[in-house]
Amino acid sequence: MAVLAAIVWDVDGTLAETERDGHRVAFNLAFEAFGLPWRWDERRYGDLLRVTGGRERLLADMAAHVDAPAGAGERERLAAALHARKNTIYAEQLRSEGIALRGGVAALIEQARERGLRQAIATTTSRSNLDALLRLHYGAQWHQRFGAVVCGEDVRRKKPDPEAHLQCLRLLSLDARRAVAIEDSPMGAAAAHAAGLPVVLARSCYFADAEAGPAVAAGPGLHTRCGWEPMARRGERDGPITLEDIEAWYLTRGR
Ligand code: XBP
Ligand code: MG
């Protein structure tokens, strides 16, 4: 029987709740800095999250603005400039205000490290955003914890396309059946599943009601063993999701 050898982590929404109070706020400050009247409230941003990638999200939103540039090239340039400014603001925000990892994340990363599992990152976010987040929690050498790191810039097609996960598996030289992906959103789960990875869906605030879809398990977050479907292993009701829970769900793949 195959043994779990690796965890492939998503970033936004999975490692930390970075969207509502991080990226969204930084996008709004970028609009302000560019003298644009556009603002994304929580609800609008939640709708826009269906579009993965910040630049792509900006372009999708411009379609709804009569005051957006008319030409495609001009829109592309504006989206790229806004996106770059947003990422600078986001990194500054993280440096000055910090952002917590979601409950259970640090403990699971540590358990996996102690047990010799390989760990990787497959994200749609920009490398600078990932660096800002992980530098905060693991220092400048954070990348030493991960055998592969694939970001938005590294792929041609973002989630729900499986390209980031497939690239991760290639870099790890690992068969998808030996790893588990942890994702927070239906788009992320679809991407990992399409790459052949069993998925654990730890729903984030914007996806609290998301369907389990192809996930081997879905629940409210790694901070609790309550509310998961299927249930976390019997007999241990309290505390965060453990590596043993992940391994038990992993063994149900393909059933
Ligand atoms: C989530 C995304 C990203 C972020 C913003 O990525 O879709 O676009 O919202 O980051 P994931 P950028 O869940 O795969 O980590 O502005 O750098 O795209
Ligand atoms: Mg995510």
Image (cartoon, grey):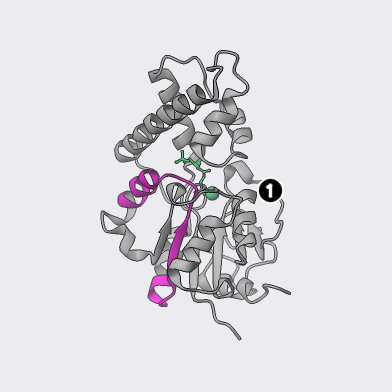
Callout 1: 10 Å neighbours few (<14), some, many (20+)?
some
> Residue 212, position in %: x, y?
70, 56
Of all residues, the one furthest to the bottom in this rendering is 1
Q: Secondary structure at mark 1?
A: loop
Which residue lies at the image location 46% right of the left edge and 47% below the top edge? 152
Q: Quadrant of the N terminus?
A: bottom right
> Residue 122, position in %: x, y?
48, 56
Which residue lies at the image location 63% right of the left edge and 71% below the top edge? 249
Pointer 1 residue: 210
Which residue range is magenta in the image? 112-135
Q: Quadrant for residue 93, please give it.
A: top left
Q: Which amino acid, mark 1? A: Ala
Image: 154 above or below 64: below
Image: 162 above or below 28: below
Q: Quadrant of the C terminus?
A: bottom right
> Residue 109, position in %: x, y?
42, 65
Label 1, ligand 2: CB separation under 8 Å: no
Which residue lies at the image location 61% right of the left edge and 50% below the top edge? 160
Q: Quadrant for residue 25, please give it.
A: top left
Total of numbered circles in the picture?
1
Please tell me which residue lies in front, 159 or 212.
Answer: 159
Please tell me which residue lies in front, 163 or 50.
Answer: 163
Residue 131 seen in the figure:
yes
Image: 3 above or below 84: below
Residue 226 seen in the figure:
no
Q: Is residue 13 left or right of residue 151?
A: right
Q: Is residue 9 left or right of residue 235?
A: left
> Residue 128, position in %: x, y?
35, 44
Instruction: Give yes or no for residue 131 being in the magenta stretch.
Output: yes
Q: Is residue 167 left or right of residue 245?
A: left
